[in-house]
Amino acid sequence: MTPADLSTTVLRAVRRAVDEDALRAPVPARVRVERTRPGGRGDYASAVALQLAGPAARPAREVAEILRERLAGAPGIGRVEVTGPGFLNFTLDACADAAAHRALLHRVREQGLRYGHGDALAGAPLQFSHAREVRAAVTADAVRRLVRAQGAPVRISCDEASDPDWARLGITVDAHGRPPVPLTEIRPVPAGARAGELLERLGPDATRWGLLRPAGHDRAPLGDELLVQGAGNPLFLVRYAHSRTHALTRGAERLGFTAARDEVSAEAFEEPAASALLAVIADHPAVLAAAAHHRAPDRLARHLETVAQAFFDFHDTASPLPVGDEKPSAAHRTRLALAEAAGTVLAGGLTLLGISAPPYL
């Protein structure tokens, strides 16, 4: 069961409690679940009972007990507990969890770079406008990519004529001037430099990352740290993690094995680092949808950093390749499938940001 699946299951329990008149409160649009923090119980937790307590005019623990009764025994959930002032804590069913993980890896493999794309914004065309400024232009271009990945047709207009150097950053503008239609303005804090200057000093990939990684209301640091080949540079961390997944695949080929496809090792999923990596891969579709909805490519950039860090934690504690006298096993094949899924997520995310994802770095 993925976090999205669990969120949907909890939301259904809330709706059922309201329909049965056990709770008198508005049903929220969505329910947030998150990994249990250190010292907590189970695999996931939710504060939905605290959210509903006020509107329901009942203590949060009482609301949590009402929901717990309707969640106990749900497919994929092994145990539901109420802790603290009214938190719901979920322990997932191990067998169902392994099946969900297997399905997740299959979905990533089948969808490839389009994993996480959807139709959340399908409908009427959207119109964005931006100033003749490089950060606004790059942000608008990334927003266009994200929104299109969620099914919406998009047109971009610039207030004035485009900077010729924008083409080297992969930016296209559909129209100039302000069209007489409703539009959304893309107005991040200006970069304070021109595209040509940034390209000369940083190149296109580091320029785009430097402009997109900070939230639009924050200043964009555009120093030489963007070119540092070390873990302290998030762009390098993300691209190196991606290239490392390709190196693992090449190493496995030399050893005569490939990633697991239909049959996977449930034991490999039980390793904490593997579980953490699976969780952030499962979060990817929701991150893409939120980044598109809020016109916030920085959310995707931060998510890619999280995936990269989770991949390295997994790589360092549960090697996908045999070590020493080990022979390739089902666990190695499963770990390699998980590593390849992480590489797919990283490549797909970088592509949506307009940044290259080389297999060698």
Image (cartoon, rainbow, N blue to C red):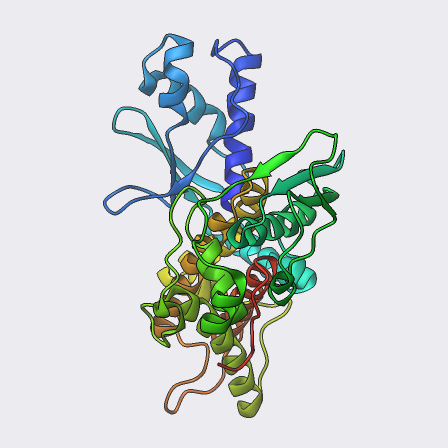
- Left-right relation of 189 to 5: left
Residue in front for this viewpoint, 178 or 152: 178
Tell me the residue at 65%/40% (across/down): 128
Task: Tell which residue pokes out farthest to the left in this image.
Answer: 39
Instruction: Specify the quadrant of the image occupied by residue 81.
Output: top left
In the image, residue 342 above or below residue 215? below
Tell me the residue at 47%/50% (across/down): 298
Residue 1, visible in the rendered structure: no
In the image, residue 70 above or below residue 9? above
In the image, residue 13 above or below residue 159? above
- Count numbered badges in the picture: 0
Residue in front for this viewpoint, 206 or 300: 206
Tell me the residue at 71%/37% (across/down): 126
In the image, residue 276 above or below residue 28? below
Residue 245, visible in the rendered structure: yes
- Left-right relation of 316 to 195: left
Residue in front for this viewpoint, 259 or 309: 309
> Residue 334: x, y in percent?
52, 70
> Residue 181: x, y in percent?
74, 30
Tell me the residue at 58%/51% (across/down): 137
> Residue 187: x, y in percent?
52, 41
